[in-house]
Image (spheres, rainbow, N blue to C red):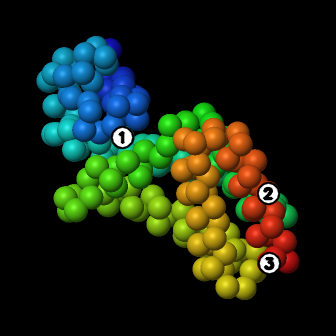
């Protein structure tokens, strides 16, 4: 196995375990065992568990934005609706037990580290995404609309654990249509 394959295996296993058991509930030994790599392999790529968590979050965010970009046509008449639909599919496929970024904020809050910064940055990026989308569509008061859509997606994510991704997404799409109609 090449070094990049081993690193990818570590990241994939770590993300799954962190998502299923929380950041604090998983030790490096478990990750090493399940990824089937040597301890030195982990330390060749990551100086600490925190460093591994940081990379897992960065990769997850990168995948989220790639996913959203592949489903949202900016020139569409309904990019906001497409974004909500794509977010719902992401929840169903990748985030059915809640939001990994919110977990990171909760687990690492007030520790003044890069992990919390990455997780909070993801939320800020979501707000900026909708603000830029509103600007491209020439919508007045784009900041308010961006906040409303960010709250909508965050609420959808939270409600996934209660009612499932499908139902939460159906409600969020209905709400998104109402928001879009108010801006027209």
Return the x and y of residue 99 as percentages of the image width and height: 47, 46
Mark positioned earlier in the residue sequence (2 or 3): 2
Q: Please state which of the two labelled residues, at mark 2 or mark 1, is closer to the viewer.
A: 2
Frontmost residue, 167 versus 15: 167
Mark positioned earlier in the residue sequence (2 or 1): 1
The numbered disc on residue 28 is none
Return the x and y of residue 110 as percentages of the image width and height: 22, 62
Mark positioned earlier in the residue sequence (1 or 3): 1
* Vertical position of residue 89 compared to residue 105: above or below: above
Task: Give the quarter of the image for residue 75.
Answer: bottom right
* Vertical position of residue 50 compared to residue 28: above or below: below
Task: Give the quarter of the image for residue 32.
Answer: top left
Return the residue at label 1. Answer: 56
Rounded to the nearest angstrom, the CA distance separating label 2 from label 3 is 15 Å
Frontmost residue, 110 versus 118: 110
User: From this viewpoint, is residue 79 visible?
Assistant: no
The residue positioned farthest toward the bottom in the image shown:
140
Return the residue at label 2. Answer: 174
Q: Residues within 10 Å of mark 1 (few under 14, many from 20)?
A: many
The reply, left or right, for residue 45 in relation to residue 17 is left
For label 2, the SS is helix
Rounded to the nearest angstrom, the CA distance separating label 1 from label 3 is 37 Å
Say whether marks 2 and 3 touch (CB < 8 Å).
Answer: no
Return the x and y of residue 138 as percentages of the image width and height: 75, 80
For label 3, the SS is helix
Quadrant location of the C terminus in the rendered image: bottom right
The numbered disc on residue 183 is 3
Tell me the residue at 16%/31% (across/down).
Answer: 43
């Amino acid at each position: 196995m090449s070094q990049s394959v081993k690193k990818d295996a570590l990241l994939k296993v770590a993300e799954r375990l962190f998502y299923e058991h929380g950041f604090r509930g998983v030790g490096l030994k478990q990750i090493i065992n399940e990824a089937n790599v040597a301890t030195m392999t982990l330390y060749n790529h990551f100086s600490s568990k925190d460093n591994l968590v940081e990379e897992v979050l960065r990769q997850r965010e990168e995948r989220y934005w790639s996913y959203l970009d592949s489903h949202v046509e900016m020139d569409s008449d309904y990019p906001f609706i497409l974004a909500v639909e794509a977010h719902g599919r992401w929840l169903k496929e990748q985030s059915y037990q809640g939001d990994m970024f919110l977990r990171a904020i909760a687990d690492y809050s007030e520790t003044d580290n890069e992990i919390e910064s990455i997780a909070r940055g993801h939320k800020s990026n979501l707000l900026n995404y909708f603000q830029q989308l509103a600007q491209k569509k020439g919508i007045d008061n784009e900041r308010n609309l961006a906040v409303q859509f960010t709250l909508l997606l965050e609420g959808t994510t939270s409600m996934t654990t209660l009612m499932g991704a499908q139902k939460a997404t159906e409600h969020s799409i209905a709400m998104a249509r109402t928001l879009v109609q108010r801006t027209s």
